[in-house]
Structures are given as structure tokens and as C-alpha cells.
Image: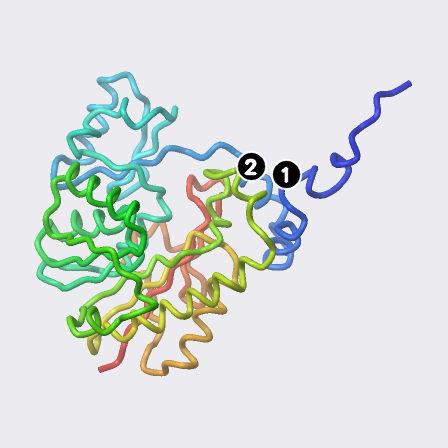
Amino acid sequence: MPALVPEIEATEPGRYRHPQWWIDAVRSAYPDRWESALRNSNLHPPLILRVNRRRLSVTAYLEKLASSGMEARLLGQDAVLLEKPCRVERLPGFAAGEVSVQDLGAQRAALLLDACDGMRILDACAAPGGKATELAELIGDRGEILAVDQSPDRINTLQRNLKRLGLTSVKSRQFDLTRNIREIERRGFNKILLDAPCSGMGVLRRHPEGKWQKRENLLPSYAKLQFKLLEAVSKCLKGNGILVYSTCSTEPEENEKVIEKFLKAHPAFKIENPKPFLPEVCHRFIGKDHFLRTYPAGENMDGFFAVRMARKS
């Protein structure tokens, strides 16, 4: 008599190892790729590094990895893929601030700002600091970056990262942008990065247990918060300034629909083509609508969304 197969294995949650509501959401958003998206979110994520260009070149760091017996390859710009993931403590130069761990998709958001030294930049929802520290490295640590986050624990993590990387242009502060924006608004910023809180549906493979802890109503609740944050930080942007909105979600409800609602309410903002600010290898991830979208499907990237918007003077 053949062994009985547990009933859950015959259901979609058992087959794809996701809650049914999550499966339905992905299938609705991506009818032509939903199965591969679900399967890939169950795979082990790659370990991708960002070399601190202020300390050494990416070529020099690749040589340092090779001398330590670690196989790695260049992914472009300052990004390196480690062929066999390891604990960060084992990475050559990590404690000395020569390198950070940051997914390739996330590294692109800072590039969209096209930040230059001397600018006043706001990194909203900044902790634990991956994008704030990347911005500081891109501008040679010459400028003014205010990195805010409402979580004191995450701000502490950000401050430790700043110390490890030896960066001084970033000033961190615990602050809830949805409650009182006036103090931040008065300062005025040339460029703003809002890496908004989200469902994390694009980074499931890094937090596999999280999908079973999330509930179906999280998408509309996040969308409401994301719009509220967008409205708040938009008040802090100077005329002719640039606002970049990003999430680590692949869901339109948290991305395209939030931006569509924001633009209808704020006609002074306009989406800009991000291609001039990104390496050519990234252009295939940019749609005709000028949105940047990446997916965890064989591209060594997490699921990620970003858009660059300019404010008319």
C-alpha cells in the first residue's frame, strides 16, 4: 500500500511554501511569472558586498578576497558577489570598514539620487544605514546627510555602521516623520531618499519565517503608511529637488499604486527617466513607465522597486 501524502502537500501553500493569500497576491500581480517568483523566494540568497570606495578600490578588494581563499566576482560599480556566503566576521576588512553587506538591487536606489558633494540630503527611514552610508561614500563623505528613523535600536545600529566605515557626513537622529515634520521641513533638502517600510515581499528568501507571520491586511496598511510618509517628506524638498521612493517589495499596491496616488495629489512632482543615473546593465530593469523593478529570479538581486521624481520650482 503506497504511503499517504500529507494533505498540505497537495495544496498550493504546501507546494509553494507560502500562505495562500500571498500566492494569490503574486499571481494577480504577475500572471506570467508568479510560479518562478514563488519558487525563487524559497532559495538561499546570495551574499553581495559593497566595497567602500573611500578605503580601497573594488579591484583591490577582490584581490584581498582571493588571497584569503574566497571566490568572488564583480557585479558592477562597487558590488561584489561572494560565491560561498560566510559570516560577516570572516570577511577581510569588514571590521576596518572596507566593505558592507548590501543587496545589488538596494545599491541602485542611492545611485538614482545622483548625489554630489556639498548637497543637503535627507535619508528618511534610514536605519540600519545601508543606503545612507552608500550615499556618504558616493559623495566622498563631503556633504550633509541627515539619516532619520523612528526606531532607537535601529538608529544605534546605524551609528555603529557609521563608526565602522569611518563616515562623518551622516548625522543620525531618531524621529517619527508621520508625527511632526515641521522641524525637518524648515531645513530644506536638495535630495531625499525614502526607502519606505513595506511588506518585504521582495526579500522573502532572506526572512523565510516572516511569510507565515504576516497577515493579508498588511498590504493596504503599508500602502497607507507609505503614502503618508511620501506626503510628509515631499514638504521637505526644495524646488527643483529630487525625491527617490523605494521599497523591497514587488507588490503594485505598495509601489505603482502609491506613486500614482501621490502624483495625482501633488502635480508639482514628475517621474524622471532613471537611465542616465544607472549603469547600462540596469537598464533592462527599467520599464516604459520609468520604474525600476528587480526580481529574485536568477539576477543575484532581491525584489526591489524604485522611482525618481523631480519637483518643479
Callout 2 crowding tier (Cα within 10 Å): few <14, some 14–19, many ≥20:
some
Question: Can you identify the residue that label 2 sits on?
Answer: 42
Q: In terms of secondary structure, where does tag 2 sit?
A: loop
Q: Nearer the viewer, residue 130 or 128?
A: 128
On screen, 1 above or below 231? above
Residue 137 spot, x, y in % from top left: 16, 47
Q: Quadrant of residue 24?
A: bottom right
Q: Quadrant of the C terminus?
A: bottom left
Mark 1: amino acid: Arg
Residue 270 spot, x, y in % from top left: 34, 76
In-image side of 257 versus 179 (left or right)? right
Residue 313 numbered mark, or none: none
Residue at the (10%, 48%) spot, across then down: 168
Residue 148 spot, x, y in % from top left: 25, 57
Q: Quadrant of the N terminus?
A: top right
Mark 2: amino acid: Asn
Does the CB distance between marks 1 and 2 fall below 8 Å?
yes
Q: In terms of secondary structure, where does tag 1 sit?
A: loop
Residue 17 numbered mark, or none: 1
